[in-house]
Amino acid sequence: MFDLFLKGGPLMWPILICSLVSVTIILERYYYFYRLRDRVPNIFPRVKMLLKDNREEEAVRLCEQDGGPVARILAISIHIRHKASEEREKLISRAGSKILRQMGKYLRALAVIVNTATLLGLLGTVTGMIKAFMKIQELGGRVDASVLAGGIWEALITTAAGLFVAIPTMLFYHYFESKVDNIAAAMKEAATEFLEG
């Protein structure tokens, strides 16, 4: 396997670095989103019921017990519910933006890795083909398949390696992006209903 890696040429090292960074980010974000999962089912209706019964402290405790983004927005909404409508909107919006930034952390890096790994693979293809054509010129046009094999190996291996890193990274990028979108929609819905209610 390592021999195959070395046959890909020097561009395999930056592709390897891209793959290591990608795996690190994917594992970190997966664990982060795993921790954000709902621990309290149907939290919003339960919080609303508690607030109807004037049990604010219990509602806040329930939000803290859940700890997810929607619960955090609800807890903030409860704490500021007696403030003016405009001020509440600003505070909730600011808190929501902060939570969204935390959820989107490192996702841009995954997008960069997708593009970089693909381009490094393409660059490997180009450099490999240049080597192959240089060999053809050195041989005066007498093509010998065994002599050309080195350049073609490099071209194919780097392309495959770049795509091997880029494709799963792109899938995880879109998976995490959809998680952020879904949570953002749930937060917005909870905040809107809370502000209107």
Image (cartoon, rainbow, N blue to C red):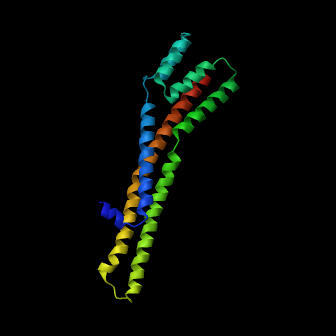
Q: Image point 32% across, 75% down: which residue?
A: 149
Quadrant in the picture for the N terminus: bottom left
* Residue 85 appears left or right of 42: right
Residue 94 position (above or below residue 123): above
Residue 131 coordinates in the image, percent (x, y) = 41, 77
The residue lying toward the viewer, choosing from 1 and 116, is 1
Q: Is residue 166 visible?
A: no
Number of numbered discs: 0
Classify 12 as above or below 23: below
Residue 140 location in percent, x, y? Answer: 39, 89
Residue at horizontal 29%, vertical 79%? 146
Residue placed most toward the observer, 137 or 95: 137
Q: In terms of depth relative to the viewer, which is nearer, 54 or 139?
A: 139
| Image quarter (top left, top right, bottom left or bottom right) of the C terminus | top right
Question: Whole-percent x and y of residue 11?
Answer: 43, 64
Is 189 drawn above or below residue 137 in the view shown? above
User: In percent of the image, x 60 and y 30: which residue is there?
Assistant: 95
Residue 132 visible in the displayed image: yes
Residue 193 percent across, percent down from the top left: 57, 25
In the displayed structure, does residue 77 sit left or right of residue 62?
right
Residue in the image at 34% along x and 88% along y:
142
Compared with 12, 190 (above or below) is above
